[in-house]
Amino acid sequence: MVDEEGIEQFQRWLQARLPIAEQIEDPAERNRTLQQIESAIQLAIQYGMLLGEAEEEVPSPFVERDSPVRVVEDASVTSKDEYDESVCRSCEADMSGDLDFCPACGEFR
């Protein structure tokens, strides 16, 4: 379970980011960043209120994995090292070495 103290600490961290975001020179980027931070603050407040009102234990919003790496078990996934660059991946037409795209279908390498 995520404790309320951790949520409050996260909220304070977000609030500390506001003055930093206000110093961004580009007005569009500054407004976008400020809106993102303010939205995150509101969500943290709402989640903290949810934790405070909950009668039962609220599960953590973070998923813990056994391994930090996701294993791909699909046999159709191939490495770039195994790919023959002289043949188009899309239409399997012969490709010229001086072009970055397939002359038959237009697919980029």
Image (tube, grey):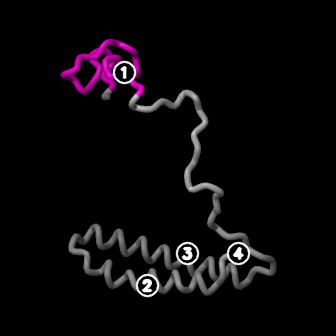
Secondary structure under tag 2 reads helix
Figure quadrant of residue 24: bottom left
- Disc sitting over residue 1 in the figure: 4
In three-dimensional space, the C-alpha distance between marks 4 and 1, rounded to whole angstroms, equals: 50 Å
* Residue denoted by label 3: 43
Secondary structure under tag 3 reads helix
In three-dimensional space, the C-alpha distance between marks 3 and 2, rounded to whole angstroms, equals: 13 Å
- Looking at the image, do the residues carrying marks 2 and 4 touch, with CB atoms under 8 Å apart? no
Mark 3 and mark 1 lie on one chain; the one further toward the N terminus is: 3
Q: Position of residue 52 (x, y in %)?
A: 70, 85
Residue span colored magenta: 82-107
* Residue denoted by label 1: 84
Q: Nearer the viewer, mark 4 or mark 1?
A: 1
In three-dimensional space, the C-alpha distance between marks 4 and 3, rounded to whole angstroms, equals: 17 Å
Q: Amino acid at mark 1?
A: Asp
Q: Nearer the viewer, mark 3 or mark 1?
A: 1
Residue farthest toward the top in the current orientation of the protein: 94
